[in-house]
Image: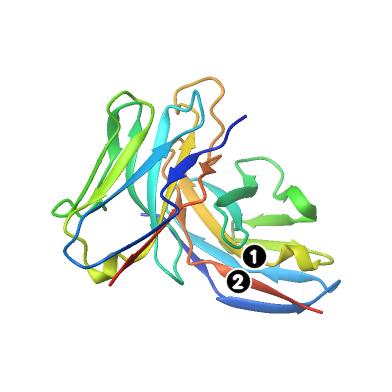
Amino acid sequence: EAGVAQSPRYKIIEKRQSVAFWCNPISGHATLYWYQQILGQGPKLLIQFQNNGVVDDSQLPKDRFSAERLKGVDSTLKIQPAKLEDSAVYLCASSLDLAGAQWRPGELFFGEGSRLTVL
Amino acid sequence: AQSVTQLDSQVPVFEEAPVELRCNYSSSVSVYLFWYVQYPNQGLQLLLKYLSGSTLVKGINGFEAEFNKSQTSFHLRKPSVHISDTAEYFCAVSVEGYDKIIFGKGTRLHILP
């Protein structure tokens, strides 16, 4: 079974530039998450999708961050314009449908992450 | 709202020695508790979880954790560590019935030869 795919793995940009990260979840996983992991900290949830609807985006800085999951499969996270404090690893994860019979609480499957450096 | 505190940012331990990584949580409702592991340059993977039932849960790679409701703790243990256990370990919590996972800041486990 293929895992969660993310790209690019590494990105270096200057502040005020824009960047986009892509994530393809495990096939059949209805729930998709984007986490931000700043060096020395735990992952912080930015946005959670159930199919193509947003479940939680309370911690997404909406003035500069946006995310979409148009067809309920892969997703894109965009930052525009980037700030120095956005330097972090952006982790995508997926899980089975919360309402589904096969749901296993807390069983998230993570990609390897996209490391962003803002200069 | 629920939260997780990992008391140690780094834990050095000699190879083949036992280890305990500490985690405390706070929540006013029933919770699910998890430990995730992140090996260098990799994503997180689930190590073990407590949902209900037996308070001692066993996970992969010989790790186990004990849920203690009175002390609101979920400490992770391994009786004998190996160099391959070098990684960062994250304790996490979610509210029963919901799929939002809150992670702690992580504990970096250093295995000394």
Apparent side of residue B68 relative to residue B30 in the rendered image (left or right): right
Which chain contains the residue that carries disc 2? Answer: B
Measured from the top left, where is residue B3 in percent x and y?
43, 59
What kind of element bears circle 2?
A: strand
| Label 1 and label 2 in one chain | yes
In this orientation, which residue lies closer to the viewer: A94 or B69? A94
Indicate which disc, 1 or 2, sits on the residue closer to the N terminus: 1
Q: Residue at 45% of width from left, 44% of height from top?
A: A6
Above or below residue A40? Residue A89 is above
Q: Residue furthest left?
A: A63
Residue B96 in view (yes/no): no
Q: Position of residue A70 (x, y in %)?
A: 27, 27
Residue B108, numbered label: 2
Query: Does the residue at mark 1 contact the one at mark 2 (Cβ under 8 Å)?
Result: yes
- The vertical placement of A16 against A72, above or below, is below
Which class describes the residues within 10 Å of circle 1: few (<14), some (14-19), or many (20+)? some
Query: Disc 1 marks which residue?
Result: B87
